Amino acid sequence: MASAEHRNESYDTVEKAAATSEQPMPWAELGLKEDEYASIRQILGRRPTAAELAMYSVMWSEHCSYKSSKIHLKQFGSKLTPEMREHLLVGMGENAGVVDIGDGWAVTFKVESHNHPSFVEPYQGAATGVGGIVRDIVSMGARPVAVMDQLRFGDVGHADTARVVHGVVAGVGGYGNCLGLPNIGGETEFDASYQENPLVNALCAGVLRHGDVHLANASGEGNKVVLFGARTGGDGIGGASILASEAFEDGMPAKRPSVQVGDPFMEKVLIECCLELFAGGLVLGIQDLGAAGISCATSELASNGDGGMHVDLENVLLRDPTLTAGEILMSESQERMMAVVAPDRLDAFMDVVGKWEVEAAVIGTVNASGRLTIDHHGHRIVDVDPRSVAHEGPAYERPYARPQWQDALNADGADGLSRPGSPAELREHILRVLTDPNQAGAGWVTDQYDRFVRGNTALSQPDDAGVIRVDEETGRGIAISADANGRYTKLDPYEGARQALAEAYRNVCTVGAKPLAVTDCLNFGSPEDPDAMWQLVQAITGLADACREMGVPVTGGNVSLYNSHGKEKGRVDSSINPTPVVGVLGVMDDVRTAVPSGWREDGLVVVLLGRTRDELDGSAWARAIHGHLGGRPPKADLQAEMALGRVLLALHDADTGDLGPILAAAHDVSNGGLVQALADMSVRAGVGASVDLTDLASREGIDNFTALFSETQARAVLAVPEGYLDLVLRAAEAEGVAAVRLGTTGGELLAIQLAAERWAAADGAEWSAEASVDAPAKADAAGGAVASRVADSQLGPETGGPAGSSDEVLVFDVAEVAAASDAVLRSLFD
């Protein structure tokens, strides 16, 4: 209970506000604009009380109201087709979307940001980001089963990057591990554009039966409003809601106390408590308390209901008895839930929370007033229409325009960058790309996460998608991949958003799952900057168009704005690289058939699906070798992506009886191109391969460099038993997907036979490598012509890298490449 000393507190009551209409109020200090404050006065017919002003300020903040983006987000609904609704049980507008995955099972999933708090206090910012998204999933009636994280940090060489990296990774791992939730996937990227604006996007998925879906609303006159979980403290007051609604103008803001403090052990108990309450039919709805705390939960519950609500704030259980009424209302203390409970179920409700040793207090009642009223020790401090607070806030049509610098950026393509002039230089470029911090192994990060707790993980990092079993009897499960490429999106926001969806869709298909639905987290700069606003509008439009074309609905997500440096607007570096994170959920009948991203045995045939074009703009090679960003991103051909997906799923689903699966491994080709995919697949289980680029280069009319580094989309590398090769080629042909045999798995080396080519060396001389392996042979044996050439030349490590090369064959020791790749982040952050 609130302390008795608050009975002497000086209250700014509703009655007082009506009598002192002209009293100045600190609306600007709370982040409101002058016209927004005028609107609040008009809605209330008086000045707001201090508590009402605080409530409107957080609920009308960018983080809570989406006031700059919601008119554009409507495209996700307006472009929804009847076919896209087929598996959709709950769509946008709720705590999380819910998708039917068959056999009476449903999955709810969502990704959200906790970016700004994670810069101010990295550990708690990241930890409470995980906790918040998990509570969103629980509030739908689901048991959380997995988490993922999308992390982006500043330049690896910057003095402050290590502070943020250590805190964020430890926070994500520490909170998720304590909850007993496997972390099954994600990305880690380093780029100077994210300096002072790291991106910490957390995704959670939960499972439930169709009949167990619950929505959060306060209906039914006389029903009780119960706050349960952790006690309310002073941490997080004006935290995420305010931190995420402004830019950091002068570096580190003096707002460290505003970051919430998480307790994963309390959350674990709260999860089990909520699930038992749902199972017993003891609650009409549950709303988690996140940004804006009690003010958000009460206004949203009342707004979603058909009546009103009264709250007595002195009944809130406090950690700190000195909190004022306004602080209680605005606190963002974590691990709290608000339930609507029928009076005849209240005793049973209290019995369950008591069993779990979770504290609870009745703080209010649902009524038919249509108003949200809040008292503190008999003093009326809030009397508002809850819809005006929660759902009828401002909606802006911010001005936006294509940036003046965009044309120059697009004109500065990678075709002007120097390319390797010899096989030796090509080998050097390969090693530099493979050991770039953005391409190297993420083991230093993922080793801090428990990926297999609960025993239902079929695939996890570094596989293309995380795969979780849902039904222990049948093996039915889900696959999730979350992807983004801020560099592509900087070059073309419309195409960049489409590409993010395409890659996540492709990754889900490579593991053998059928894509069903999408969640997104749109990370962009200041909406008050027309450049950043243009990027946001273009990306939303591109993603909405792409979802319609691919037939997958957006079920919900998050928008994070003001990821800018507070510097001069209108510059090419005023904001982060715009980063639309797209998560795709897929379903598979039996997770035991999930396809790993690397081969594990000798003698498999390596096949490339998809066309390869000269597309190096925005590539990993351009960044790692030249520190360059410019040109136009690879085209996202969604029809080609869907055709590729149909081939992958047809091969995965084919009934081969006792002969075994067709796909031994599958991996998408994306950042780093074909050479990155080949290295990843070899390193996965330490098994090498002999490949030949001759047929690929000849068919596409490209050189060896382009064949290895191009980032053309809609491609995947497969490993299949020799006896299935013809079937694979025929399946690809049936869908119009190009296919070429590259070689064979085996041994401890990754040997790449170069196609015949005349090289233009840096000194102007020409170097010629005439391939001495017949093109039809394609390095068709595990030892074969390529391996014999390696042995004859007695290749060994060369200075500057973990492997050597001959004039015609680039050879890499798989174990050494794996060790060098894994050591990159460890050497930077251990």
Image (cartoon, rainbow, N blue to C red):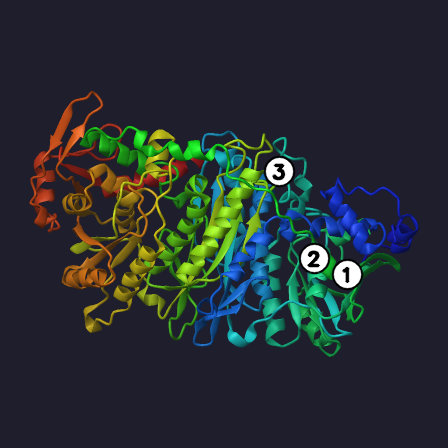
Within-10-Å neighbours for mark 2: few <14, some 14–19, many 20+:
some
Q: Which residue is mark 1?
A: 385
Q: Badge 1: how crowded within 10 Å, few (<14), some, or many (20+)?
A: many
Q: Are marks 1 and 2 in contact (CB under 8 Å)?
A: yes
Q: Position of residue 593 (x, y in %)?
A: 31, 66
Kindly report the distance in space between the C-alpha atoms of the residues bearing marks 1 and 3.
Answer: 30 Å
Q: Nearer the viewer, residue 261 or 246?
A: 246
Query: In the structure shown, which secondary structural element does the residue marked by tag 1 occupy?
Result: loop
Q: Position of residue 428 (x, y in %)?
A: 25, 31
Is tag 1's residue or tag 2's residue first in the polypeptide sequence?
1
Q: In this figure, which residue is indicated by the disc labeled 2? A: 392
Q: Which residue is labeled 3 in the image?
A: 247
- On the image, the x and y values in percent for residue 656 come to 21, 71
Q: Is residue 12 left or right of residue 174?
A: right
Q: CA gap, disc 2 to disc 3?
A: 25 Å
The mark closer to the camera, 2 or 3, is: 2
Nearer to the camera, 696 or 250? 696
Say what secondary structure mark 3 lies in: loop
Q: Nearer the viewer, residue 329 or 651?
A: 651
Residue displayed at 59% across by 69% down? 275
Q: Amino acid at mark 1?
A: Asp
